[in-house]
Image: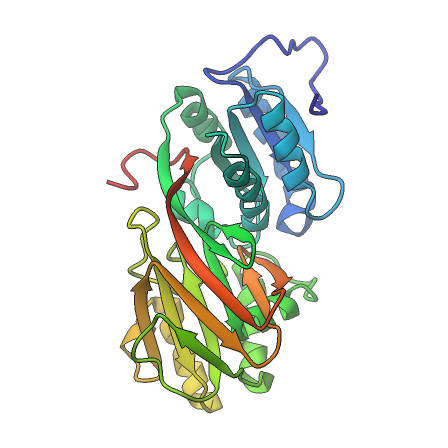
């Protein structure tokens, strides 16, 4: 059975409408979760949700999720950031169990929580949504053997993430903004060819993002027309440029107006293939991964995951 911790006097017999557990990443939000966690647990205990599992190492969310599903859990609440959500979603989709995913956002960017419309929700409000039991099925992306909820990025995107992991004196959106500004001056572009997308200019690329949701790195509206219920991914190709043009792209991406710039090509696709000169690093739901080969296929799996979202967010 999945390991749980409950306060004295609480009984595991208390359950919400469907068997539910929380998977908590104690390292989320660069440790900022520690101050917020007591109120989160209190809110869910107030709704008789007392089944809680804690990660003890990076990436353990997938194992905990698989164990929970095997124990009959029908709703998993991710307490953490985008990486925690992405890893749990990966396990759910692979299990084909129909288990639902909810999120209490306590991460750095919380992009997926914005997509679900719950980024500004208090823990008690999210617990109430979970207890009501209404869920919506959304699309999921797939790349290189992994599923993703929000985004998969290459080039500048992955370089910024790698740099941000070394920044310890900032939290929240400021981490990505600071890292991105520094990388504008030093990052070298990547060589890549795309199949399945027309109009992409040849030559070195600054960045490629393939998005299911609209947001990236907390502060950037990287795919302003993306929808998690349209059966498509939004691919965006940024041609490499000088520092001044890079800065304009940076500001445009924060406002969501970069698609109008001549160095940017975008397309809504069901699938595409990217061919790199070397095996690329990639940002996937806020985590740094490395592709297994130089050729990478990406595709959208329509309505592959049931999620608990704010009322009316997908209408």
In the foreground, 42 or 53 = 53
Q: How is the image coloured?
A: rainbow
Residue 137, quarter of picture: top left
**Residue 119 visible in the picture:** yes
The single residue placed furthest to the bottom in the displayed view is 242
The single residue placed furthest to the left in the displayed view is 315
267 lies above or below 130: below
> What's the residue at 47%, 72% (across, down)?
274
In the foreground, 139 or 166 = 139
Q: Looking at the rendering, in which quadrant would you find the N terminus?
A: top right
Q: In the visual, does 5 lie left or right of 200? A: right
> What's the residue at 60%, 66% (across, down)?
161
111 lies above or below 152: above
In the foreground, 12 or 109 = 12
Q: Looking at the rendering, in which quadrant would you find the C terminus?
A: top left
Residue 128, quarter of picture: top left
The single residue placed furthest to the right in the displayed view is 56
175 lies above or below 26: below
45 lies above or below 35: above
Q: Pinpoint residue 217: horizontal percent, then vertical percent.
A: 50, 61
């Amino acid at each position: 059975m999945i390991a749980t911790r409950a306060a004295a006097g609480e009984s595991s017999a208390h359950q919400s409408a469907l068997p539910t557990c929380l998977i908590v990443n104690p390292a989320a939000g660069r440790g900022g979760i520690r101050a917020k966690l007591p109120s989160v647990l209190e809110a869910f205990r107030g709704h008789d949700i007392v089944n809680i599992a804690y990660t003890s190492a990076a990436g353990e969310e997938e194992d905990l999720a698989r164990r929970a599903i095997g124990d009959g859990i029908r709703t998993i609440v991710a307490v953490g950031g985008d990486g925690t959500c992405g890893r749990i979603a990966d396990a759910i989709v692979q299990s084909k169990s129909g288990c639902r995913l909810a999120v209490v956002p306590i991460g750095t960017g919380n992009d997926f929580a914005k997509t679900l419309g719950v980024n500004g929700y208090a823990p008690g409000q999210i617990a109430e949504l979970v207890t009501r039991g209404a869920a919506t099925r959304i699309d999921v992306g797939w790349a290189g053997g992994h599923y993703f909820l929000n985004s998969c990025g290459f080039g500048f995107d992955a370089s910024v993430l790698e740099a941000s992991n070394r920044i310890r004196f900032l939290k929240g959106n400021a981490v990505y903004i600071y890292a991105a500004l520094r990388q504008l001056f030093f990052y070298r572009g990547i060589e890549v060819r795309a199949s399945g997308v027309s109009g992409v200019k040849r030559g070195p690329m600054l960045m490629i993002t393939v998005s299911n949701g609209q947001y990236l790195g907390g502060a950037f509206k990287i795919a302003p027309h993306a929808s998690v219920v349209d059966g498509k991914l939004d691919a965006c190709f940024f041609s490499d440029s000088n520092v001044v043009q890079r800065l304009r792209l940076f500001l445009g991406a924060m406002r969501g107006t970069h698609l109008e710039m001549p160095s940017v090509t975008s397309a809504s696709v069901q699938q595409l293939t990217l061919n790199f000169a070397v095996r690329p690093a990639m940002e996937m739901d806020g985590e740094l991964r490395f592709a297994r080969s130089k050729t990478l296929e990406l595709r959208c799996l329509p309505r592959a995951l049931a999620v608990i979202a704010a009322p009316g967010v997908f209408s």
